[in-house]
Image (tube, rainbow, N blue to C red):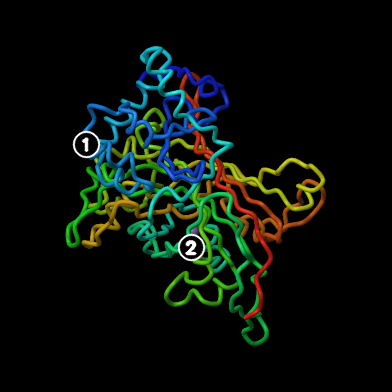
Amino acid sequence: MALSKRSWVASANDAGCDFPIQNLPYGVFRHEERTRIGVAIGDRILDLRSCAREGLLAGLAEEVVAACGADLLNPLMSLGPAAWRALRDRITELLDAEDSSKGTRDRVEKLLVLMNDAVMQLPAQIGDYTDFYASIHHATRVGKLFRPDNPLLPNYKHVPIGYHGRASSIVVSGQEIRRPRGQTKPPAGDPLFGPTKSLDYELEVGVFVGPGNALGSSIPISEAEQHIFGLCLVNDWSARDIQAWEYQPLGPFLAKNFATTVSPWIVPLEALAPYRVPVAERAAGDPAPLAYLLSPSSDKDGIDLTLDVDLESRHMRQTGMAPMRLSTGNLRELYWSIAQLITHHASNGCNLRPGDLFATGTISGAATGSEGCLLEKTRAQGPITLTGGELRTFLEDGDQITLRAYAHKAGLPRIGFGECTGTIAAAGAVL
Ligand code: MN
């Protein structure tokens, strides 16, 4: 798509807008008691079900038109890249300032909903959720806290580490996060049960699976990205005190599965094409990936995507202070690419299904200021002083965490992800 293309939806052409005509992310929204699939354009949502009903998708394959009438994205996800491209091309035509006729524009304009009037929903039925550990900077810093002499375990550079998370507690941006209760073990003393005292966020990018693979089959690395419908933001809320006590020997469990927040818009890989970069270079002496993980396109398997984390405490909100930036990182610093995550997951014959969610794991950079969670930041550097003077080692009730992501370079359209936000509510009643 031409990188200079503009939309007749004026707000889509604003310099700071996340959703220009070159982005066109998919989501599911509720408006006037109806749930529908839509595409973000500027400050509006194009209602795809109505587009289908009004004949604006005529000429596309029947299955594509039918998928646009669903109230979840799974049917569209299952169709694969050729179908996604055909639909994206048609939506581009409908919104293009130059291509679309006045008559078309009038018909499409009636099908736009103001984002502010809609409530975003989970975009898909998520069958399975897998969380990885693909940032070597995160793995090294966290490893150092527990094993100062041997921060990185011997498997890290050979095998993409992950664990099976829980899909039932994934919520869409904006939903309140209740502080979990759990079992912890004070350094001196018996285990006890109560609200976590070490609630943390994890800045991650989510990958929604498109077409899956049959049980027993695998996905070659050269085809991995054809199985990716698009990307979103993920906050993998974590209770560090519960985690520290429960995680051995089987890994994360109740410290992670009480809630995971996703951003509502799924950005197609096609929109990110101008921002593809080589995967992060492996240090001298690092092993090459085994053949099944060795990508023929490692010169463009990375993505140059800036990632910001902001915190706003209840006090800051009540006194009108702006949220405070906690960190800025970049997706390009991952050790394992999103293609490698897909291929590795299916390499044993595990079947992926349309709508499955992968998350990268906490994304941290090498530099101070790019740590993707509080554990890394405050264990090493001490508590953070917020604007207004409050101290934070971990999250307090009323704290709001907002993740943002965008790709931007001079002369290229800004491709934004919107927001992934959640506010901590007090723990519920005692069991
Ligand atoms: Mn995580």
Could you tell me how far apart the alpha carbons at marks 2 and 1 are, in whole angstroms? 34 Å
Q: What element does badge 1 sit on?
A: helix
Q: What element does badge 2 sit on?
A: loop
Q: At 55% from the left edge and 68% from the top edge, which residue is drawn?
A: 146
Quarter of the image with the C terminus in it: bottom right
Q: Locate residue 87, reporting x and y percent.
A: 30, 31
Instruction: Check disc 1: other Cα within 10 Å, few if <14, some if 14-19, many if 20+.
Output: few
Q: Is residue 247 left or right of residue 313?
A: left
Q: Nearer the viewer, residue 262 or 311?
A: 262
Q: Is residue 42 above or below residue 10?
A: below
Q: Number of labelled discs?
A: 2
Cβ–Cβ under 8 Å for marks 2 and 1 = no
Q: Is residue 288 above or below residue 108?
A: below
Instruction: Check disc 2: other Cα within 10 Å, few if <14, some if 14-19, many if 20+.
Output: few
Q: Nearer the viewer, residue 419 or 335?
A: 419
Label ID, residue 62? 1
The kind of residue on which mark 1 rests is Glu
The reply to whether residue 139 is visible in this rendering is: no
Mark 2 or mark 1: which is in front? 1
Q: Is residue 359 left or right of residue 427?
A: left
Q: Locate residue 193, reporting x and y percent.
A: 63, 81
Q: At 25% from the left edge and 48% from the top edge, which residue is drawn?
A: 211
